[in-house]
Amino acid sequence: MGLPSNFGLRMMLACCCGTAACSLCCKCCPKIKQSTSTRFMYALYFILVTIICCVMMSTTVANEMKTHIPFYKQMCKGIQAGEMCEKLVGYSAVYKVCFGMACFFFLFFLFTIKINSSKSCRAYIHNGFWLIKLIVLAAMCSGAFFIPDQDTFLNAWRYVGATGGFLFIAIQLILLVEFAHKWNKNWTAGANHKQVWNGLLALVTLILYSIAVAALVLMALFYTRSEGCMYNKVLIGVNGGLCLFVSLVAISPCVQNRQPHSGLLQSGVISCYVMYLTFSALSSKPPETILDENNRNITICVPEFSQGLHRDENLVTGLGTTILFGCILYSCLTSTTRASSEALRGIYATAETEVARCCFCCVPDGDADAEEHVEKRGGQTVVYDEKKGTVYSYAYFHFVFFLASLYVMMTVTHWFHYESAQIEKFFTGTWSIFWIKMVSCWVCVGLYLWTLIAPLCCPTREFSV
């Protein structure tokens, strides 16, 4: 009986302090790569802190705690959190918790700069010591509540958060443009060998433009009316015109001469995203009201069915928040691959090395090195796929999560309407959220347009997209 207990102890120490992040999972789980398990663990920490932030912004949870927790008032006084734990709720608490999480990822960003081998001491720390990291993260989030001069800290940290949030949005927009170009380049490379890729290009392009046009028509029907709704009419018209403009530029002869790979597939992707951002912005705009013939206030410029949906605030908030932060997490993980980090530095694969694939954004499974070292320790099989080098940039990974921490902080606290922010009113329209989404839409169009005209503006410089 001594051997199993000693083995279990060693396994627990390996999971908490070593590099076996997922080796304690059950055997029924599929095998997992070490690089994937590491990113999964950091994402788990991110989700945990994000959930805590949402709870802190919920008046419903606060009221339930006051009602059902015995000696709640005495407990709050005991931990010096105020008479009713007011220091642990609201936007200021979220700022402090996100400050701790942002510092955690920023320190790891500095710590992992220039790591190219997974065998170095710093790489071992990055890939392991999960229990210690969790304690450090908890200590940082808790320690932020003891920062002196809270008012100055909160005011300064708000501007840092806004800057980081905008930078996170910008990175995602850059990678979206890169994604569109990469998709077109990959399938165009296949069209040089098999005509079926030309058919796929045409079909997908047609679908993308059909979605964009349908979205434009539906927004014009449901978000405008004959009288009023001037904001909606102008913005829908402007964004629809921008989509048409970039599509014409993409297939213009002068652009085609410098960039033969430029086409309607990229502009179709951008047009769909612009329509999505336009819809999201219009949904986030504060409602407009007018007096009807009976002198009653009625809401206009929004679909009638959406007013019924917003009556169940808990359902809308819960579902919407889950989808939103799922998208944030997906953006973090997909934008931290080595290809994405190289794309941000202007490094792209050459057309000669492109291999056309339907799932072009995934790396082919023909990498034999990933299978060279597999360990089974009674639990989930872990594939050590970084024996010959790192498969993603550790520093860039932590930097993106640092920015995502700031973006979550600003999003949960309604950006610049923080004083009245509540998670139950997460999808109540505010002008700050509306303009952030609308400006993001125009920045996306501007970035894509620049990739088209940059070779014309700087003919002596080499561009590769």
Image: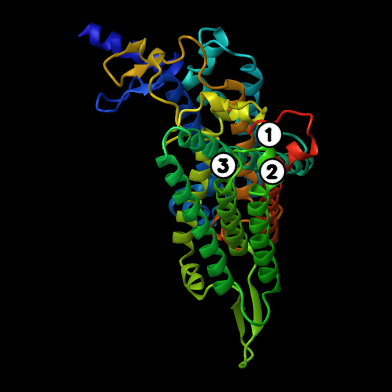
> Residue 151: x, y in percent?
77, 43
Q: Residue 100: x percent and y percent?
A: 63, 32
Check disc 1 and report its element: helix, strand or loop: helix
Query: Please, is residue 21 above or below residue 249 in the view?
Result: above
Location of residue 124 in the rendering, given as x and y in whole percent from the top left corner: 51, 12
116 sits to left or right of 446: left
- N-term mark: 2 or 1: 1
Seen from the viewer's position, the closer of residues 354 and 445 is 354
Residue under pointer 3: 180
Residue 16, quarter of the rendered image: top left
Q: Is residue 290 left or right of residue 363?
A: right
Up/down of 251 relative to 79, above or below = below
Query: Given this view, does label 3 or label 1 mark the residue nearer the observer?
Result: 3
> Tag 2, which secondary structure?
helix
Given the image, on which type of amino acid does mark 2 rest? Answer: Val
Q: Residues within 10 Å of mark 2 (few under 14, many from 20)?
A: some
- Badge 2 is on which residue? 255
Q: Residue at x 64, y 39 (%)?
A: 174
User: Is residue 330 shown to the viewer in this render?
Assistant: yes
Q: Quadrant of residue 234?
A: bottom right
Circle 2 or circle 1, nearest the eye: 2
Q: Which mark is residue 146?
A: 1
Q: Amino acid at mark 3?
A: Ala
At label 1, which amino acid type do we have? Phe
Q: Earlier in the sequence, mark 3 or mark 1?
A: 1
Quadrant of image for the C terminus = top right
